[in-house]
Image (cartoon, coloured by chain):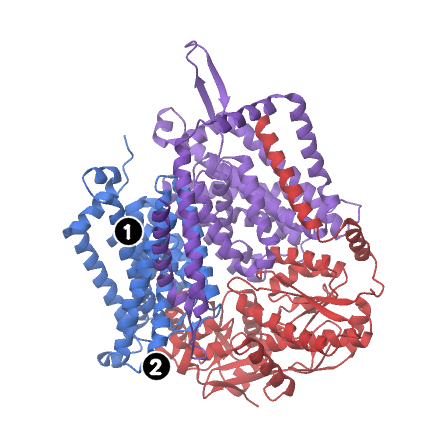
Chain colours: A blue, B red, C purple
Amino acid sequence: MGFDYFFKLFIGGLTKGSIYALIAIGYTMVYGIIGLINFAHGEVYMIGAFTALIVAGILSVLNLPMFAVLMIAVVIAMIFSAGYGFTLEKIAYKPLRNAPRLSALISAIGMSIFLQNYVLLAQTSNFLPYPDMIPDFAFLEPIKQTLRTTQLIILVVTAIVMILLTLLIKFTKIGKAMRATSQDRVMAMLTGVNVNRVISVTFVIGSSIAALGGVLICSHTGRTHFYIGFLVGIKAFVAAVLGGIGSIPGAVLGSFVLGFTESFGAGYISSDYEDVFAFVILILILTFRPDGILGKSTKQKA
Amino acid sequence: MKKTVLIMLVLLIGITLVFTSCGKKEADVAEEAKVVEEAKVVEEAKVVETIKIGVAGAHTGDLASYGLPSVNAVELVVANVNAAGGIDGKMIKLVIEDDQCKPEIATNTAAKLVGEDVVAVIGHICSGATKAALDIYNESKIVVISPSATSPPLTKSGDYPNFLRTIASDDAQAVLQVDFALNVLESKKIAVLHDKGDYGKGLAEFAKAGIEESSAEVVLFEGVTPGAVDYSAVINKIAQVGADAVIYGGYHPEAAQLIGGMRAQGLDIPFIGCDGVKDATFIAVAGDDAEGVYATAPVDTTSNLIAVKAGKEHLAEYGEEYGAFFLNAYAAALAIVNAIDVANSTDYDAIMAALKSEYVETPIGNISFDERGDAIGVGFAVYQVKNGKFSQLD
Amino acid sequence: MIKDRLLKSLYVSLWLTVLTFPVMVIRVNTIEDTVTWRWGNLLLILIGSYVFSLIWNYALERQERGKKVKTNKLSIKIKEIKATVSQSRPMKISGLAAVLAAVFLFPFLTSFYQMSIMNTALMYVMLGLGLNITIGLGGILNLGYIAFFMVGSYSYALLNQAIGLNFWIALPIGGLVALIFGIIVAVPVLRLRGDYLAIVTLAFGEIMRIVVENWSSLTGGPSGIRSIPRPAIPGVDLNLIDTAKLVYFIMIVLAAFTILITLRLKDSRIGRALIAMREDEIACQSMGINITKVKVIAFALGAVFAGVAGVVFAANTTFINPASFTLWESVLVLCIVVLGGMGSIPGVIFAALVLKLMPEYLRAFSEYRMLVFGAVLVIMMVFKPGGLIPEKRKHYNFTNKDAADFEEEDV
């Protein structure tokens, strides 16, 4: 098993990592702001994918170039997912802001189940083929078998998103407000930050990224299903925790660690225990760094 | 402490009373005592105006797409029978219950169906759920015909005398897959994959055993995780070990992903799936990559007149093409209706005898059942995707 | 005011209609390349969400108001009635007797199906009570709890297969094996806090399940283990229905046992240490309580009950495979504990019965069952975040008659 094999597994790991990253970012943003594991995030991702599928389906009669369809579908999917995220927060999380954390968690779980079945009933229980909306790049033809266009796009988009978000949080006013709210909500309110708006914005951003991820990932795997949110969501959440929950670079880093672990574990040892490797790495990392790789240790209040 | 205990117990009694009174509206104590009696003694022919048949399987949840087509099938058959006057003038009433393919829910489902005095059950869909429920049906002497539970011990072990199925068990399919790979494709190094599920892994293990007995080699035996976003690691492995064919046990979603990944990475070796793969959705999802893929499945029935008719009925009634195991369930329903008719009674032994001696024309062929409950006349064939459709190879 | 409310709900309903437009109205089938439009759904959402929004906002407002209005005539009267009832001995005894009679007579008055589902529900009652110790008392979020249930089930199934182990002996052994696993899991988990702890427990739960799933030679893999013997009384030949009755009584006894242990635990030193740890770890440590020991106990105790329940589960279902012990089941038990009210025994029992029996009784609406379940969870948590029957904490009232006098009151 030479370098070639290693390299292929590496690319596979990159792909997986970037897929998890797009979703993990949303988890970590919400957790950073309100300390809640947004179980329904996976469903927002799934709804984004479905919305894009529906839009593409309608547009197919117009015979537009693939690229245009992709752009329109992605934008509309992002808008709708943002709407779902916003509404989700208002219904299921806002009333529970001062309630015990576990209650909010259960509410999130309930919302997740509700959305899954909502799509199941409104659409179908079948796996639906997903049109590959991403046009193929000509310059990738020769290495098509090692790196497909979809994989490259997902990787690039993940990088761009991460950079943009980091810039947003560091240099813009709303970013500052987000940081303030995540540090101490009451103080933020006292200094004039509109906490409700900040939280809503967080959900909107996280959900749109999830929708974007949904379209790209489903284009890559070629199919969508009402249950995909749950399956990927757990992994993405584990990745976010691994990297240090609340930190966006942490979420991305954690996702790549997870992706590589799975890819190399499956490639060199056994695909049977793929998930076990992922979880074992998680446990190991948390044993030595209890707050995740890039996590800030949460100081206990004096 | 006492107060807590008191309140807790009060709640328990409250709930108990509420639910027992709810339940009791449907059947009174005498009826239930009768059920108890009949469970102990082989029933005399029940003089009833309706014949109840149960349909059990996964109707909700993520495996619903494997269970719902069977419901449609039985509904269509029963509608036809009732329209023609029922069996000897007695109408058939269906009792459709969901078990979500979970063994622990399946036992409750079975208890419910037993309580409803069903004469036979068509189901369950998943082998695991079936294994859990069969005991309960056996005690109450109820015939069970499954359109999809393929686990070999269900018939081979002899532990379930009341069980029949209108689908061949996994070992038969695996034999065909291996045979095809070795003798037709002349593969020497075969990668056997599965989806870590009961059906998939069972099939794969039979295939593995079959290959090991021959001159060919099993170069890889691994499971893929359903729902994972990317199978490139496994696919790389397949290429790495130099496999010249892949035998897969599992369902179409994972198969579609595998074949898509394989072709994208330039791995053009033959892919031999099973009847979980032979599904229109597989071709739809895999698209062009599905071309050339093999799959073993029950012998081609598209020219079978009954199958064609059943397909048209389904389209007319439900507005879409039928799904997994539809024809098998249709056949099971036809078989049971025929058996009750021929036996002229709803007595367990009579129906069983009729099922095992009579041949019935069904969408999957002219079938009967053998001593152990496997269907006779249900053959397997190898199919290949040609021009976007599965066609049988001869 | 009313007009404002109506208008607000109109905006909400319009918003929801637009939001759900793609998913509800348009159905794209890429297998057959069809696009169907269902305009009926549009109207449904418009009207439905309008009504729903009105009710929802009204309920929220009432909840807000309710928090402030505590002393009105009706609630005082109710308190008085409650006090008199709970103090009078004859009422207590007759109430207890009635309950015991109902519990005892239940199996003889109902059908096989009713008992079957009650047995399943009782198993979840026990699971809920077990997790209640870990979460409710100890404040440790265990997302992999069902793994202990699985361990108990498999220990019975495997030992029975290997050495023909009898069901009755398997019960404590299942608990013991689960205890060992509980301790094994607790050790790495000790240093972690809050959500990191939760994720690691999830990881352990999944690891155990996947290992069982893949280690076919030991555990039968995904095909599971079948033909597990049901509970039996040696020498007596029981048919199915009587076995169900036996299982029922076993579960009642086990549940009562669990309740007893939990109650004794609450009042014991360890119990108070658990509660202290749940409330504030640092303060707890500064009081000299060994957090490590207490955490392990919380974990292990919860595990034991799950293990024992697992043995009964295996015997009742006669067939087990890893698919019965997924993350989803852990989540379900978690919902039971939180919905019922963390730490509250009657709450957990009630929630377990409701969450397990409701889907069975609503089989007619089975298509919408999960949808309703999700909605119920959200609604319950929004309107009763403390759970259905919140835990009653010991509450000390100081009256200003005499500084030295104080009454202890269970509020």
Distance of mark 2 from mark 1, alpha carbons? 36 Å
Q: Secondary structure at mark 2?
A: helix
- Residue, x 45% and y 11% (percent of image)? C405
Q: Position of residue C301 (x, y in %)?
A: 52, 37
The crowd level at tag 2 (other Cα within 10 Å; few <14, some 14-19, many 20+) is few
Q: Is residue A238 above or below residue A138?
A: above
Q: Position of residue B191 (x, y in %)?
A: 47, 75
Tell me the number on the disc at residue C131.
none
- Residue, x 16% and y 51% (percent of image)? A170
Q: Is residue B300 visible?
A: yes
Residue at the extreme left = A171
Residue at the extreme right = B44
Work out whether residue A158 or residue A58 is closer to the camera in this orientation and state it: A58
Q: Position of residue A59 (x, y in %)?
A: 33, 77
Q: Is residue B347 above or below residue A61?
A: above
Residue at the extreme bottom = B394
Figure quadrant of residue B99: bottom right
Q: Position of residue C130 (x, y in %)?
A: 53, 40
Q: Residue at label 1?
A: A200
Q: Is residue B246 visible?
A: no
- Residue, x 47% and y 48% (percent of image)? C377
Tell me the number on the disc at residue A61.
2
Q: Is residue B73 left or right of residue B197?
A: right
Figure quadrant of residue B84: bottom right
Quarter of the image with the C terminus of chain B is: bottom right
